[in-house]
Amino acid sequence: MPEKKETLLVRANVEMTAASLQAIVENAKRISGPNEKGGYRVDTADKVSEMISRFLLENDFENFVKNVDNYGE
């Protein structure tokens, strides 16, 4: 099991494709399912944050940012 690291909440603007955002919304709605009135109660901003955070933790963002070569244009 991977070591649990201390994390901080950072609010940032993130560029992503429309298709990525659409997939997050569709999958979040699919998982939560509709309520009794047929509507969906999903906070898509929270879900986007969750998905990006998971991606960064699982794909070793920490080592990526430690490498100065990744800061070039």
Image (tube, rainbow, N blue to C red):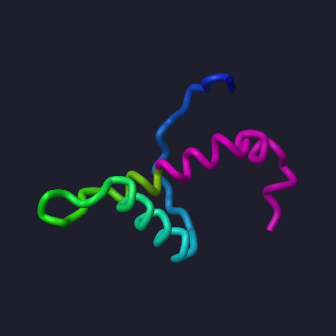
Q: What residue is shown at x 71% (from left), y 40% (from top)?
A: 62
Q: What residue is shown at x 79% (from left), y 57% (from top)?
A: 71
> Which residue is most to the left?
37
Q: Indicate the position of residue 8 as horizontal and vertical percent values.
A: 51, 35
Answer with left or right where residue 43 lies relative to residue 24.
left
Quadrant the C terminus occupies: bottom right
- Judging depth in this view, the residue of 16 and 34 nearest the camera is 34
Magenta highlight on residue 55: yes
Answer with left or right where residue 56 lies relative to residue 42.
right
Q: How many marks?
A: 0
> Which residue is most to the bottom?
18
46 w.r.t. 25: above or below: above
Q: Which contiguous range is marked in magenta?
A: 50-73
Magenta highlight on residue 68: yes
Q: Indicate the position of residue 37 as horizontal and vertical percent values.
A: 12, 64
Quadrant the N terminus occupies: top right
Q: Quadrant of residue 28?
A: bottom left
Q: What residue is shown at x 46% (from left), y 57% (from top)?
A: 48
Q: Main secondary structure of the magenta part?
A: helix
Q: What residue is shown at x 57% (from left), y 74% (from top)?
A: 17
Answer with left or right where residue 43 lies relative to residue 67.
left
38 w.r.t. 57: above or below: below
Q: Quadrant of residue 41?
A: bottom left
- Judging depth in this view, the residue of 15 and 39 nearest the camera is 39
Q: Indicate the position of residue 68 as horizontal and vertical percent values.
A: 84, 49
